[in-house]
Image (cartoon, rainbow, N blue to C red):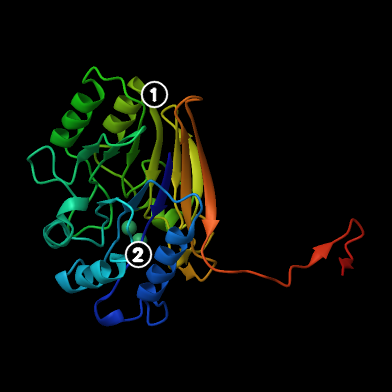
Amino acid sequence: MLIAQLTDLHIAAGRRLAYRKVDTAGALEKAIDHVMALVPRPDVVLFTGDIGDLGTAEEYALVGEILAKLTIPYFMVPGNHDRRGPLRAAFPHATPVANGAGFVNYVVDDFPLRLIALDTLDEGRAGGILLPAQLDWLQRVLSDGTDRDCAIFMHHPPFRTGIAHMDAQNLGAGADELARIVAEHRDTIRAVFCGHIHRPIHTIWSGVPVMVGPSVAHQVALDLRADGPSAFVMEPPGLHLHVWDANAKSLTTHLSYIGRYDGPHPFFGPDGKLIV
Ligand SMILES: [Fe+2]
Ligand SMILES: [Fe+2]
């Protein structure tokens, strides 16, 4: 089973440039072309939030136009730049609500790996939150007796990445309880897929791998200083390809760059001289 994870689209209405520089609509078009050209083709696409930039119906209409080319089943969770109402109105099939409390928490059981969507959006705030009702719902899903191998996908990472200005707005309230639940079910939770940081980042947290996907548009600068300022960079955009081998019970994550990078690529010998 092949899962493509696309995250942090930040689509603006009227194809407005993000930060007056980044053509996020064009970046999403390239990302979708990239996914559709992959061989083998992914079985499912997960969008891990920040689909829009302000969370308006106009933004999601543009996303819908671009996603018309995506003929692979896809699912979404909201990020801090989204709003549940307009997102769900535009993509009801991709944001089913299972727990009746209005959150975009749901389970997809159509594939060899069970997919569990967790909605960490705290509308109006950059940081993420999981309320007790959502954590109770997750506990019930994980304890339903099916014992299915699963992956959780959500926008805000639950761990500290070392990029301080982003860590200040990661998953806040509910993170400790989530850590407890995940540790309790670490034999069936194969991975947690996140977005929000706009960089590929990997760790082990609560006994399971957690992977943050790169943005399909712009990346956050790699700056590990405690007082590093908020900054974005135009490194090559990318997406994560997660390969689930049900027989081996193994999950492997690959970073797939979007676009062609033919070089020149300089190589340096042991003496530090350029090899041509
Ligand atoms: Fe984002
Ligand atoms: Fe975000």
SS at circle 1: loop
Q: Is residue 230 visible?
A: no
The residue sitting at the left extreme is 100
Q: Nearer the viewer, residue 10 or 148?
A: 148
Near mark 2 (Cα within 10 A), the count class, few <14, some 14-19 or many ≥20, is many
Q: Kindly identify the residue that appears in the image at 36 percent across and 60 percent down.
A: 8
Q: Position of residue 241 (x, y in %)?
A: 47, 48
Q: Please state which amino acid type lies under the numbered disc 1.
A: Arg
Q: Where is residue 139 in the image (x, y as percent from the top left)?
A: 22, 26
Q: In this view, does 98 lie to the left or right of 172?
A: left
The CA span between labels 2 and 1 is 30 Å
Instruction: Find residue 186 and name its label.
Output: 1
Q: Is mark 2 within 8 Å of ligand 1?
A: no
Q: Position of residue 111 (x, y in %)?
A: 33, 36
Q: Please state which amino acid type lies under the numbered disc 2.
A: Leu
SS at circle 2: loop
Q: In this view, does 5 lie above or below 219?
A: above
Q: Which of 245 and 84 is in front in this view?
A: 245
Q: Kindly identify the residue that appears in the image at 24 percent across and 67 percent down.
A: 64
The image quadrant in which ligand 1 is located = bottom left
Q: Kindly identify the residue that appears in the image at 51 percent across and 25 percent down.
A: 248
Q: Is residue 25 above or below residue 69?
A: below
The reply to whether discs 2 and 1 touch (Cβ–Cβ < 8 Å) is no
Would you identify the image quadrant in which residue 176 lies? top left
Q: Nearer the viewer, residue 197 or 7?
A: 7
Q: In this view, does 234 lie to the left or right of 122?
A: right
Disc nearer the start of the sequence (2/1): 2
Would you identify the image quadrant in which residue 130 lies? top left
Quadrant position of the N terminus in the picture = top left
**Can you identify the residue that label 2 sits on?**
9
